Amino acid sequence: MRLVFLEILKEGPKHGYEIIRILEERSGGRYVPSPGSVYPTLQYLEEAGWISSETQGERRVYRLTEEGLSHLNDQAQELSDFWDRYGQPEFSPAARHELEFLHQELHELQRTVLEGARSLLAGGRERALRALRKSLEECKNRARDLIAGDEEQPA
């Protein structure tokens, strides 16, 4: 975690919650440290002389020092190993577009299902609600099969 923080601070000064957000984004949510681990780590890095801090308003802003940059460069392989494990893969523009499309479709599906479920409940149509739930479970299982490669993909 120390090296990752140093790498983030290499880009410029940041406060603790910015560091958490950047880690979450870069790892695709696979690595999200808690504030309870971030701030003690930042304190350790400052005591080691690898970062410095200053108060700006209500926040503490952290900066990489020359010693921190040197330490970071010395540990390049360990940092690379971390990102190999936790990093979010880079996608082509077309793939990013497809992911965004899927995200929008899921959002629309969620809205449709929740509004429909409320309508079914209000109309006393519990049987139709159970059928809706079953349909969603089947869809989820089909998606899992496609992801796992257990089914042929449509041509």
Image (cartoon, grey):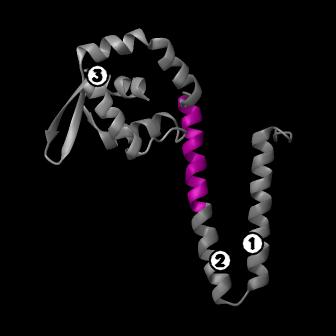
Residue 3 lies in magenta, yes or no?
A: no
Residue that carries the numbered disc 2 in the rendered image: 117
Q: Quadrant of the C terminus?
A: top right
Sequence order check, earlier mark of 2 and 1: 2
Secondary structure category for the residue under label 3: loop
Percent from the top left, x then y, of residue 34?
Answer: 43, 45
Q: Is residue 96 above or below residue 50?
A: below
Q: Is residue 101 left or right of residue 135?
A: left
Give the residue pinned by disc 1: 132
- Give the residue displayed 14% in from the left and 41% down from the top: 56
Q: Amino acid at mark 2?
A: Ala
Left or right, residue 44 beside residue 152: left
For badge 1, the amino acid type reads Leu
Dot 2 lies on which element? helix
Quadrant position of the N terminus in the picture: top left
**Image label count:** 3
Q: CB of mark 2 within 8 Å of CB of mark 1?
A: yes
